[in-house]
Amino acid sequence: MTFLRRLAVWQCLRVRRHICVQTTEFSAAGTVLSPKAERQPWTPFYTHSRRLHSELSSEAAEVELNKLEGGDTGIAEVVMCRQHARNSLGKVFVRQMRELVSSLHHDSTVRVAVFRSTVPGVFCAGADLKERAQMANAEAELFVHGLRSLMTEIALLPMPTIAAVDGYALGGGLELALACDLRTAAFSAQMGLIETTRGLLPGAGGTQRLPRAVGFAVAKEMVFTGQRLGGERALQLGLVNRAVGQNSDGDAAYREALGLAREILPQGPIAVRMAKEAMNRGIEVDIASGMAIERMCYARVIPTRDRQEGMAAFIQKRPPQYIGE
């Protein structure tokens, strides 16, 4: 990312953050484990949980950041936990998510971010319609503008992002998943941009990101009809990267996302970030301009210590040990 582009993103993302850090141990389902609890092979070793709200406030955390440790160091989980409202996109939820995403933009220790939910059967149910109904037209328009900006901030995160869709991802919930680079889903998940059934249209990037994911004809059909797709159909259309049968814990997509994150984790972090930037910027321009963008991103990898380590590891026939420099 060029200096000017970084400056523009920073100016866009500036928010006041009050972060209260606490260390806990979680199971994959998000529940606290006792010190003697036995971990399954796929379970994160343990995590740091950051509650994104003021230390002086009694405001409940609706979004949290868990940084995995042990062999999963470098994976961060964006955990949506607005239990009483099915992770709907209310004012507090959006503000906390914006603060968390802003912190990730400047955290070079995070190599992969997984967006997941601890609300059973729900990824994100979309707009908080009860809250939205209390807004005047101008206020509602301003709020949706902020929501669109949030999805752009998620899309601009420098590290790969994965949405783990274990339940409903409707309206703004699917737009959130579309803002991520990759998506996993349970077969039982339900995904759709259903705004036209409410007399609206997708307003947080859905009309732009869905066609890029599934093609214009399919995207138009989905938006015009407000239809919902299960995980298997979403996989067939390319809406998700991987789909799996749901398990008894209701977190099959999360487990699949964690497995995918573990496949990305050993790769050179600077190379992965530059590859993401090259693809994201290149898809918006003609092929010649895209080639120029690739050349610039490649040039930024050449002088890194990670590139030297990758070459040395290949010659010495050993796994590389990347440090992100």
Image: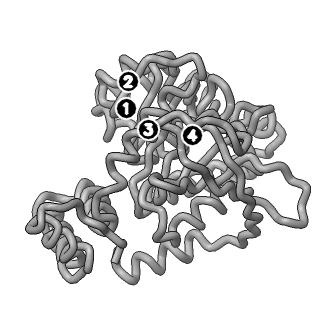
The CA span between labels 2 and 3 is 16 Å
Q: In the rendering, at what x and y percent does residue 305 appear?
A: 26, 79
Residue on which disc 4 sits: 116
4 vs 2, front mark: 4
Q: In this image, 126 relative to 215: left or right?
A: right
**Residue ID at (55%, 30%):** 169
Q: Amino acid at mark 2?
A: Ala
Residue on which disc 1 sits: 240
Q: Secondary structure at mark 4?
A: strand
The CA span between labels 3 and 1 is 11 Å
Marks 1 and 2: CB-CB under 8 Å? yes
3 vs 1, front mark: 3
Numbered label attached to residue 234? 2
Q: In this image, 57 relative to 274: left or right?
A: right
Q: Amino acid at mark 1?
A: Val
* Label whose residue precedes the other's in the sequence (1 or 2): 2
Q: In the rendering, at what x and y percent does residue 247 appear?
A: 52, 18
Residue on which disc 3 sits: 257
**Residue ID at (40%, 82%):** 4
Q: Amino acid at mark 4?
A: Arg
* Label whose residue precedes the other's in the sequence (1 or 4): 4
Q: Secondary structure at mark 3?
A: helix
* Label whose residue precedes the other's in the sequence (2 or 3): 2
Marks 3 and 4: CB-CB under 8 Å? yes
| Residue sitting nearer the eye, 196 or 192 | 192
